Amino acid sequence: MTTHHGLRRLARTLLLLLCVSLLGACGGEQPTDTDDAQLDPRAFRIAWSIYVGWMPWGYAAEAGIVDRWAERYGIEIDVVQVNDYIESINQYTAGAFDGCVMTNMDALTIPAAGGVDSTALIVGDFSNGNDGLVMRGQKALSDIAGMDVNLVALSVSHYLLARALDTVGLTEREVNVVNTADADIVGAFAAGGVEAAVAWNPQLSAILEQPQATLAFDSSRIPGEIIDLLVVNTDVLAANPALGKALVGAWYETMALMAQDSEAGAEARAAMAQAAGTTLASYERQLEATRMFHEPAEAAAFARSAALPETMDRVRRFSFEHGLLGPGADSPDAIGIAFPNGQVLGNEANIKLRFDSDYMAAAAASEAP
């Protein structure tokens, strides 16, 4: 995910919002090679970054699956890898991409908070052990009171810490959050001065391989709360439903392939592992800690579940308390979040994040929405 400090992330996001408010003009911020795509109503750009649940996008692009589905609907889709996760979302927010992979929390706190109406088109998976809190020595989670906790501030790791503390009756005021880049967190723990750390895979696995590392809490304790999405600009999707159909079709063809217990499935997973810079065995361990929705019916049901609004209510309250809903937000209700059943959390006049189930349900029924 991101290689930038959480506080730098917030500063950069606020700067981005200022740029967007000034007619989107921050000279040179958007790549000039997007100009042709923006002029062609049939050409679209989707950003992705390396993470276990998003590797299928890179594979689908390389294997020609995306091109095949795009051609079926008479459009072009360029799937672009962006090495900096947060920067990919910032560029999406600024209009350089029509869609981008991101977590549910980041979808709320960056594009939605930036005024960009976005639709969660595909619910790909949720973390089911891929994020965890590690303590040094054989300590219980309740022993964390008074400790320094190293993590990427204002990220899903920060959210996981808050949820972990809540399970033992503690609050963030009773620990000291030490902002640490994800690129540095493994080395910091190995150096011996870190008492506790929160990380996501593959960094989490690397920390747990070190002596005296004890997993005190992980995302399997809060299933369905750290969600990986493909988010698409709502206006672009409304004007170009073929984009949604092609993306969903390509995704679930790839899901079916990678879920196969066959030589073809193993080859697909091996290609994803190689692109992620790891081994097939390591990648498959990460998949075991990820609840992938291989079937579109499962993903659609998750998007329609009563649990999703409850999760997003927790996420928006955490985000507001940490100043992530933007400087103008005076309550968690500042931004509206819409769900497939018609329920809206927050301001119905300012809906900026929408969870859609129609395209996934149509894929399950093998018909266009």
Image (cartoon, grey):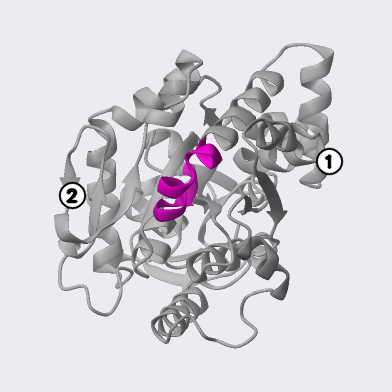
Q: From where the camera sits, is residue 191 visible? A: no
**Do the residues bearing badges 1 and 2 touch, measured as CB atoms within 8 Å?**
no
Task: Determine the residue positioned at 51% across, 79% down.
Answer: 8
Task: Provide the residue span drawn in magenta.
Answer: 228-244
Residue 238 colored in magenta in the image = yes
- Which of the image's four quarters has the N terminus? bottom right
Task: Determine the residue positioned at 38% across, 29% down.
Answer: 358
Quick check: 364 above or below 91?
Answer: above
Per the model, the C-alpha gap separating discs 1 and 2 is: 41 Å
Q: Which mark is residue 345?
A: 2
Binning the other alpha carbons within 10 Å of mark 2 as few (below 14), some (14 to 19) or many (20 upward) gives many
Quick check: 264 above or below 238?
Answer: above
Which residue is tagged 1? 274
- Along the viewing direction, whichever of 263 and 247 lies nearer the viewer: 247
Name the residue type under label 2: Leu
Name the residue type under label 1: Gln
Mark in the foreground, 1 or 2: 2
Mark earlier in primary sequence (1, 2)? 1
Binning the other alpha carbons within 10 Å of mark 1 as few (below 14), some (14 to 19) or many (20 upward) gives some
Q: Secondary structure beneath disc 2?
A: strand
Residue 235 colored in magenta in the image = yes
- Along the viewing direction, whichever of 27 and 88 lies nearer the viewer: 27
Task: Determine the residue positioned at 67% across, 59% down.
Answer: 186
Where residue 133 sits in the image (x, y, percent)? 48, 49
Q: Secondary structure beneath disc 1?
A: helix
- Along the viewing direction, whichever of 346 and 146 lies nearer the viewer: 346
Task: Determine the residue positioned at 27% across, 34% down.
Answer: 340
Where residue 164 sits in the image (x, y, percent)? 35, 48
Q: Relative to residue 318, is residue 80 drawn left or right?
A: right
- Which of the image's four quarters has the C terminus? top left
Where residue 239 sits in the image (x, y, percent)? 44, 49
Q: In terms of image quadrants, where is residue 114?
A: bottom left
